[in-house]
Image (cartoon, grey):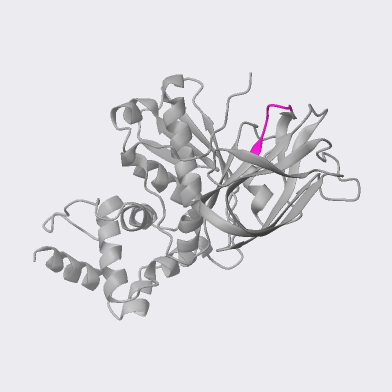
Amino acid sequence: MRRAIRLALVLVPTMLIVPVVARGEPVAAIVDTNLETGSRQIRQFAFDGDAETFFASKENLGVSDHFTLVFDQPVSVKSIAVVTGKPGPEGTGKLKTGVLEVSTDGTTFTELAKFADGEAREDLQAKSIRAVRIQPTADQEHPLTVREFTIASDPPVARFEYPVEIAVDCSDSPELQEWADKVARLCELWYPRLNEALKSDGYKPASYIKMRISSSYNGVAQAGGGNILGSSKFFKAHPDDVGAMIHETVHIIQHYQSRKNPGWLVEGLADYIRFFLFEPGKIGPINAKRARYDGSYRTTAAFLAYVNDKYDQSLISKLNVLMREGTYKDEVFKELTGKTVQELDEEWRESLKR
């Protein structure tokens, strides 16, 4: 029996921390499907603007299955096109029998076009649409392969510029399955914003991440090798601490290879993204008497925020690039601000006393 993969963010209020989109900006989309991904051909590849990537389901497509794009808000759609089948002349995996459906409210769907030779397309006259769905009308003898959705709308629907899928493993903590699924979806939703904050030339972030919740792990959470490990004991006691998983997702994005990078800065930068981008205002008080710039985690995050705001508002990006290149040295603070890291530390701690 297939486990439904619901990607819509139906979260408890304390977990619903979604990126804020300014008016006029592209509208975000999420994938809603009951199909399990096969061979790491992730769901978001179906709407990433790259004709060479594609989503592929693990199992053959059945008449009760669906693959749906849901928009954050209704958009005025001019045209929709969907191409199924793998790239290449053979185009294997095309949907043979099915329809393309649309919904104005994200719940009730009506037929828009039939698939022919694996494709469906239709021109609309600025119709308000909230969701578009691929719906088979008969069982298929192969998995579903979706190469690309193309949607012309006003405002535009943002493609998945940083496509990612976070696969959840709660095999030894099944009671946390629903919680972990929601957290993984939240991390996916924030993945573009996190990557934008830490982008650098030539760097391509991971598109597939494993998140395992373990009953034998006694820490809080950790990341390494493209995997995130969380403690079931901790998250049972602290289910609202989803920022810890955002922190670990940042570590996956950092992808630093050099052992020369100081741990205090690696952790501090990840906590900066957590506390000043994901959940601003939740960092808590910093003790001026005990604080040091290299105190790591939220202490270093507060220090970085002070220097970033006062001296160089691209400081975080620059530090990230240097650590990704393996060329970071403490002297860079002098180069970027005109003051040594020790001088900045004293100034920052003095500001905490006010």
Q: At x 62% / y 41%, what residue is drawn?
A: 68
Q: At x 83% / y 27%, what residue is drawn?
A: 141
Q: Nearer the viewer, residue 19 or 198?
A: 19
| Residue 281 versus residue 70 in the image, above or below | below
Could you say where residue 249 lies in the image, as x and y percent from the top left?
46, 47
Is 327 contained in the magenta span? no
Q: Nearer the viewer, residue 53 or 327?
A: 53
Q: Nearer the viewer, residue 106 or 159?
A: 106
Q: Quadrant of residue 332?
A: bottom left
Query: In the drawing, does residue 310 fall left or right of residue 288?
Result: right
Outermost residue toward the right? 89
Is 63 contained in the magenta span? yes
Q: At x 65% / y 55%, what residue is drawn?
A: 48
Could you say where residue 324 lies in the image, as x and y percent from the top left?
51, 61
Could you say where residue 194 lies in the image, as x and y percent from the top left?
46, 56
Instruction: Say whether residue 240 is visible.
Output: yes
